[in-house]
Every structure is written in C-alpha cells, then in structure tokens.
Amino acid sequence: MHGFRYFLTIVDDFSRYTWVIPMHTKSEVRTHVASFLSFVENHFQTTIKIIRSDNGAEFAMTNLFSSKGIIHPKTCIQTPEQNGIVERKHQHILNVTRVLLVQANLPPIF
C-alpha cells in the first residue's frame, strides 16, 4: 500500500513497547533511526544507550551512534535467536497483518 515494501521494527527492551515504521527502501533506515533518537530525547527526556541490530548494512551508522554515545552490538550472521524478542515481534506483526487482510477479503496484491 502506498509503495511501502519494508518496515522497521523498534522494540523497547524494558517495556516491550513497539514502533513499526513503514519504508519504501532500506536506505531510509538511517533517517528513521536519527528521527527516532530525537523523538525519544524530546518526548521522554531520556537518552538511548544501546541499539541492538542485525548485521545489515543499513545499520552502519557509526558516526551517528558514536556522536550520541550509543553502543551498537550486532548479532552474529544467521543467528536470529540472538535478537529473539524483535524476531518474535516481527513474525507476530506479519501474521496479524495476513489475518487482517484475509478477514477483510482483500485481493492478494495487498
């Protein structure tokens, strides 16, 4: 819908609150992460200390993370178990989306 092909899932480790950000391309990750950092700092008066991600090239933001003092551990390749919380959330989001599309009797292109 509207050309979105990807989505970025951000999960707070403490509260498990989840943000889902739709994206047209993977190259948008840098922009969305930077704006998310600003959002958290302004609305919650706190700073993010650690951002954990997979080894995707779209998360190579060393300058941004070091300027904010953020530690960026990455999971090992082909081991989704290390990022289990986000992986389970990701699967849940996909499953719920599929069920809603089927229940709404929408055509398969959606």
Image (spheres, helix red, strand yellow):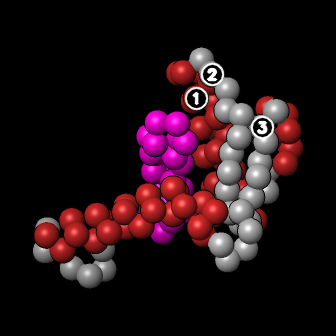
Dot 3 crowding, Cα within 10 Å, few <14, some 14–19, many 20+: some
**Res 54 quadrant in image:** bottom right
Q: Residue furthest front?
A: 81
Q: CA distance from mark 3 to mark 1?
A: 13 Å
Residue pointed to by mark 3 = 70
Specify the amino acid type for callout 1: Val
Apparent side of residue 69 relative to residue 23 in the rendered image (left or right): right
Q: Earlier in the sequence, mark 1 or mark 2?
A: 1
Q: Nearer the viewer, mark 1 or mark 2?
A: 2
Q: Callout 3: helix, strand or loop?
A: loop
Label 3 with label 1: CB-CB less than 8 Å = no
For the residue pair 26 and 66, the one nearer the viewer reads as: 66
Label 1 with label 2: CB-CB less than 8 Å = yes
Label 2 with label 3: CB-CB less than 8 Å = no
Q: Residue at x 54, y 61 (%)?
A: 84
Residue 40 bears which disc, if any? 1
Q: Which residues are magenta?
A: 1-25
Specify the amino acid type for callout 2: Thr
Q: Residue at x 59, y 67 (%)?
A: 81
Do we see residue 58 in this rendering?
Answer: no
For the residue pair 79 and 29, the one nearer the viewer reads as: 79
Q: Residue at x 77, y 48 (%)?
A: 72
Q: Callout 1: helix, strand or loop?
A: helix
The x, y position of residue 34, in whole percent, is: 67, 40
Q: Residue furthest top?
A: 45
Do we see residue 20 in this rendering?
Answer: yes
